[in-house]
Amino acid sequence: MKAMKESSLKGISANKLLALASRNTVLVTHNGKPGWALVPLNGRDWESYVVSRSPVFKRAMGRSRNSIKTGRGLSLAEVKKRYGIK
């Protein structure tokens, strides 16, 4: 991982930053605290990465977990039976 001050990004081109981030995670700090990071996705499934970090997806998963906790969830066997999956 490479840490960089946010102020130091002014002198770096986007292409150079992207090239650096394709090899390493780049942690950008603001006033000495982590601000954001560029994470390489080499060999990873982009869609899975994006969906797993989506606030909409996280809310849907939260609702699903709450349904299970309150007894309104379905088992895999029940889902298969309901939708005719063998």
Image (tube, rainbow, N blue to C red):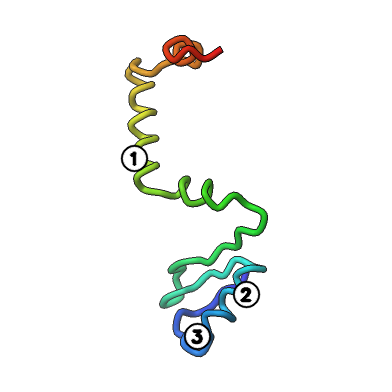
Q: In x, y percent, where is residue 57?
A: 39, 42
Mark 2, secondary structure of its residue = helix
Q: Residue at x 47, y 74 (%)?
A: 29
Q: CA distance from mark 1 to mark 3?
A: 36 Å
Q: Look at the picture and state if 74 lies above or below 43.
A: above
- Residue position for label 3: 8
Total labels drawn? 3
Q: Residue at x 46, y 67 (%)?
A: 36
Q: Earlier in the sequence, mark 2 or mark 3?
A: 3
Residue 86 is tagged as none
Q: In x, y percent, where is residue 37?
A: 50, 66
- Residue position for label 1: 59
Left or right of 66? Residue 30 is right
Q: Amino acid at mark 2?
A: Leu
- Residue position for label 2: 20
Label 1 vs label 3, nearer the camera: 1
Q: Amino acid at mark 1?
A: Arg
Q: Earlier in the sequence, mark 1 or mark 2?
A: 2
Give the class, few, some or many, for how many residues have Cα within 10 Å of label 2's Cα (few <14, many ≥20). Answer: some
Q: Residue at x 35, y 36 (%)?
A: 60
Q: In x, y percent, where is residue 19?
A: 62, 75
Mark 1, secondary structure of its residue = helix
Question: Residue lying furthest front in this view?
Answer: 84
Front-most of 43 and 62? 43
